[in-house]
């Protein structure tokens, strides 16, 4: 257990819980600074990658992250999963394996890792993820050309290297692998591309395939969503154990506590949300969520856009950068 410090209501690394399409109420863990990633995907809702790197190190202090997790748990926060995700690629943190082991001591809830899968060619990364209950890697393309176009990876990551890592991880990992495939209209939404993806999936052998598309307007890039009827047709090509992930389902929730405007901002910084999403995620009345959002809008910390007639709240964006570090 991490050494306890003076209690604080400020959370820098642990956020939510947020409503997840696949993990229910997900307590998020952010192990890297904003937009520190191995990719610069054209569909990312958080904007351009500000630090594109394959360098693994302790980007944020692990003891501080564990302390915040302990605070959330002792505050009787209601959640279904501890989820390593956030605003960057979590496997870049060199202490991710230790975090999973220590988190297991703090809670009996399952631990999920949402990763782009780009570093699974590294045996150390595969070993670090061995204790997770669920790993959700991504596969967005079936060739080097579309991989480069959609994911815009670090120069050290080729399509072949990434794919070898996914296959190796499946051969070693004893628990559940849910492979997410995100299709971009006009780029990877062709029958030939999907057929190639089907053949690759047969090599990876995940427990589940989760087919999705752009569900929120990307902060940068030309990505457009694939129509639902086309997603359903493509899902049939992958066969059984394939599901289509569309919009976040509606949750009928009963308020379970209170939250600060900082809690609301922490959630929205990682996941653009509607008022219903915020209230449901944090277990607070809609009126309380509205009050906090109005304050954050007044302070110029949030802005809005409309998606399918629903007002979504997002943080004001940082300026993009082409900052790339060498391995």
Image: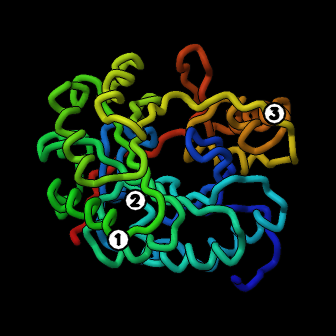
**Label 2, on which residue?**
36
What's the residue at 72%, 50% (across, down)? 262
Image height check: is 224 above or below 238?
A: above
Residue 172: image tag: 1
Q: CA distance from mark 3 to mark 2?
A: 32 Å
- Which of the two discs, 1 and 3, sits closer to the camera? 1
Question: x and y percent of residue 192 in the render?
Answer: 15, 29
Of circles 2 and 1, the one toward us is: 1
Quadrant of the image occupied by residue 285: top right
Residue at the spot of label 3: 291
- Can residue 221 be seen? no
Q: Is residue 286 left or right of residue 166?
A: right
Question: Between residues 4 and 104, which one lies in front from this camera angle?
Answer: 104
Left or right of 277: which side holds 148? left
Q: Is residue 100 above or below residue 178?
A: below
Disc on res. 120: none
x%, y% of residue 64?
Answer: 64, 75
Choose the circle earlier in sequence order: 2 or 1.
2
- Which is more N-terminal, label 3 or label 1? 1
User: Within 10 Å of the Cα at label 3, are there few (<14), some (14-19), or many (20+) other Cα atoms?
Assistant: few
Task: Assess disc 1: are there few (<14), some (14-19) or many (≥20) residues with their C-alpha within 10 Å of its C-alpha.
Answer: few
The residue most toward the front is: 240
How far apart marks 1 and 3 lie (CA) works out to: 48 Å
Q: Is residue 267 visible?
A: yes
Residue 260: x and y, percent?
80, 49
Query: Does 298 appear above or below 269?
Result: above
Judged from the image, the secondary structure of the residue bearing numbered disc 2 is strand
Q: Earlier in the sequence, mark 3 or mark 2?
A: 2
Q: Residue at x 49, y 28 (%)?
A: 246
Is label 2 in contact with label 1 (beta carbons under 8 Å)? no
Residue at 48% across / 76% down in the picture?
97
């Amino acid at each position: 257990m991490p050494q306890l410090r003076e209690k604080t209501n400020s959370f820098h690394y642990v956020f939510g819980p947020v409503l997840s399409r696949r993990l229910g109420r997900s307590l998020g863990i952010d192990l890297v600074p904003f937009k520190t990633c191995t990719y610069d995907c054209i569909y990312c809702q958080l904007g351009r990658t500000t630090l594109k790197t394959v360098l693994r190190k302790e980007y944020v202090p692990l003891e501080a992250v564990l302390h915040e997790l302990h605070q959330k748990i002792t505050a009787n926060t209601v959640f279904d999963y501890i989820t390593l995700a956030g605003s960057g690629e979590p496997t870049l943190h060199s202490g991710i394996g230790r975090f999973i082991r220590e988190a297991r001591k703090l809670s009996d809830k399952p631990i999920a890792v949402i990763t782009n899968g780009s570093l699974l060619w590294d045996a150390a990364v595969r070993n670090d993820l061995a204790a997770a209950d669920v790993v959700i890697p991504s596969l967005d393309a079936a060739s080097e050309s579309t991989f480069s176009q959609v994911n815009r990876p670090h120069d050290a990551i080729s399509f072949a290297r990434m794919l070898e890592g996914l296959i190796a991880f499946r051969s070693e990992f004893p628990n559940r692998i849910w492979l997410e495939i995100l299709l971009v209209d006009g780029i990877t939404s062709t029958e030939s591309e999907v057929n190639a993806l089907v053949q690759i999936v047969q090599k990876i052998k995940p427990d589940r395939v989760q087919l999705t598309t752009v569900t929120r307007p990307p902060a940068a890039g030309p990505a457009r969503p694939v129509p639902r009827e086309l997603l359903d047709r493509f899902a049939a090509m992958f066969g059984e154990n394939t599901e289509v992930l569309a919009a976040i389902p509606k949750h009928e929730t009963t308020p379970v506590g209170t939250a600060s405007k900082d809690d609301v901002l922490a959630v929205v910084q990682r996941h653009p949300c509607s008022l219903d999403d915020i209230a449901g995620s944090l277990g607070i009345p809609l009126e309380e969520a509205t009050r906090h959002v109005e304050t954050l809008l007044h302070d110029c910390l949030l802005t809005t856009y409309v998606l399918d007639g629903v007002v979504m709240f997002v943080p004001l964006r940082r300026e993009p950068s082409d900052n790339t570090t060498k391995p």
